[in-house]
Image (cartoon, rainbow, N blue to C red):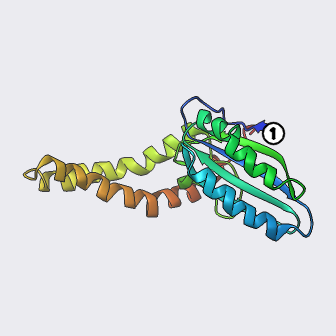
């Protein structure tokens, strides 16, 4: 089956994680058969080297489904897309559904801090994510260095080193980054032509 691949504005780089969204059109009346098929091909894909997750979405009424595939790198994704296992699963769905397109996007792993719930808005450019993360992390690094480091100076190095991420990461993930992404939303998600 031919793939229609639309490269997103984010360049796919060698060796970086990649996310692909595949869109399927299901023949009316075959939705249950298709959903059963999705469970089988998902199990198969998850066992394939480099797979980091598969999700299925049926966001609108009608007969379109979307699968979101996350892979460790573009080469392993391509290996899956061209694999005999996937081809075998595609034969099973002939006459039931048609894959009508895909979009690939490389990811940094930071996108979840900048995701807008309930939307399909793409993550901001990497330089904006890095700058925003710096703005969020720097005050905490300063506080940890000032308050925690002197109090733990006598501790063994591995224990002292563990304190830094134990304090910083939960604070960034649950408090600081959600707040910063809301406060800086207009700047982070401004279209490139502005």
Image point (79%, 38%), residue name: 6
Where in the figure is residue 109, as x and y percent of width and height? Answer: 52, 46
- Taking the image as shown, residue 152 lies to the left or right of residue 35, namely left
- Residue drawn at x 70%, y 37% is 82
User: Which of the 4 image quadrants contains residue 4?
Assistant: top right
Q: Residue 78's image quarter?
A: top right
Query: Dividing the image into 4 quarters, which one contains the C terminus?
Result: top right
SS label for mark 1: loop
User: Left or right: where does residue 36 sit relative to residue 99?
Assistant: left
Position of residue 170 in the picture relative to residue 127 (left or right) = left
Q: Nearer the viewer, residue 150 or 73?
A: 73
Residue 64 appears in the picture as rendered: yes
How crowded pointer 1 is (Cα within 10 Å; few <14, some 14-19, many 20+) is rated as few
Residue projecting furthest to the right:
28
Residue 187 versus residue 34 in the image, above or below: above
Residue furthest out toward the top: 14
Q: Nearer the viewer, residue 172 or 38?
A: 38
Q: Residue 7: x percent and y percent? A: 74, 36
14 to 50, vertically: above or below: above
One can see residue 59 in this view: no
In the image: residue 146, left or right of residue 135: left
Residue at image point 43% right, 44% down:
134
Q: Position of residue 185 (x, y in %)?
A: 62, 54
Q: Which residue is mark 1?
A: 3
- From the top left corner, tell me how far across and down residue 135 is, in percent: 44, 47
Which image quadrant for residue 62?
Answer: bottom right
């Amino acid at each position: 089956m031919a793939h229609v691949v639309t490269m997103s504005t984010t360049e796919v780089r060698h060796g970086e994680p990649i996310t692909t969204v595949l869109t399927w059109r299901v023949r009316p009346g075959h939705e249950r058969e298709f959903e059963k098929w999705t469970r089988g091909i998902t199990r198969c894909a998850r066992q394939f080297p480099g797979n980091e997750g598969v999700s299925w979405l049926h966001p609108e009424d009608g007969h379109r489904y979307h699968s979101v595939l996350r892979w460790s790198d573009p080469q392993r994704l391509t290996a899956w897309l061209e694999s005999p296992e996937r081809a075998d699963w595609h034969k099973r769905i002939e006459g039931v559904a048609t894959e009508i397109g895909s979009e690939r996007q490389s990811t940094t792993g930071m996108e979840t801090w900048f995701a807008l719930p309930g939307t399909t808005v793409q993550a901001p450019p990497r330089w904006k994510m890095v700058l925003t993360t710096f703005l969020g992390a720097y005050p905490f690094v300063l506080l940890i260095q000032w308050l925690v480091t002197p109090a733990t100076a006598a501790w063994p190095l591995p224990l002292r080193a563990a304190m830094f991420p134990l304090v910083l990461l939960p604070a960034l993930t649950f408090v600081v980054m959600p707040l910063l992404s809301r406060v800086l939303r207009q700047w982070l998600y401004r279209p490139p032509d502005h």
